[in-house]
Amino acid sequence: MSRRLSAGEDEPVVIVEYDLRWPAMFAEEAARIAIALRGHLLGTEHIGSTAVEGLAAKPVIDIQVGVRSLQPTRELVGAMAEIGYLYFPRWRRTCPTADTSAGGRGGEPIRCTWSSAPTRPGGTAT
């Protein structure tokens, strides 16, 4: 069963029943991201409604990626592009420590947001 809600934009929001494949889809994508961002990656987390077992949700896998620094943005964007992600820099204006990309294979929408690690004085990751 799916429900359509108004998102206030041209596209309606579609809510679907929980899909048992969502955790595996996250794990597969997290492994691909780990390879693409090696040397920069601090960790990945499955976030958002698809991360909650049994919860009906928008069928979009949201992934939070922690990186050492956003300073090599072109390098990070390039690495994500190589595995099929598109870069959307619009969040940079409101959250300068985060960026977002969207991708996916086989038609599954996947959104990946990355943020830099909090730093101590002197610029080292906490």
Image (cartoon, rainbow, N blue to C red):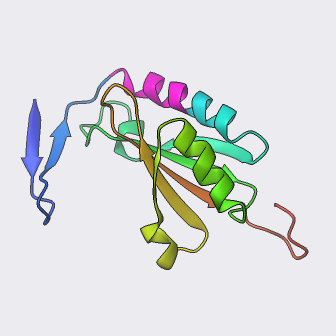
Picture layout, residue 108 above or below residue 46 = above
Q: Is residue 23 visible?
A: yes
- Nearer to the camera, 98 or 126: 98
Identify the magenta region: 20-29
Q: Quadrant of residue 116?
A: bottom right
User: Residue 28's spot in the image, x, y percent?
Assistant: 52, 24
Name the residue rendered at 8%, 46% in the picture. Answer: 4
Residue 47 covered by magenta stretch: no
Picture layout, residue 105 above or below residue 15 = above
Name the residue rendered at 65%, 61% in the picture. Answer: 73
In this rendering, position of residue 4 left or right of residue 38: left
Type of secondary structure dominating the magenta stretch: helix
User: Residue 104's spot in the image, x, y percent?
Assistant: 40, 35
Name the residue rendered at 35%, 44% in the picture. Answer: 49
Residue 24 covered by magenta stretch: yes
User: Residue 102's spot in the image, x, y percent?
Assistant: 42, 47
Q: Quadrant of the C terminus?
A: bottom right
Name the residue rendered at 11%, 60% in the picture. Answer: 10
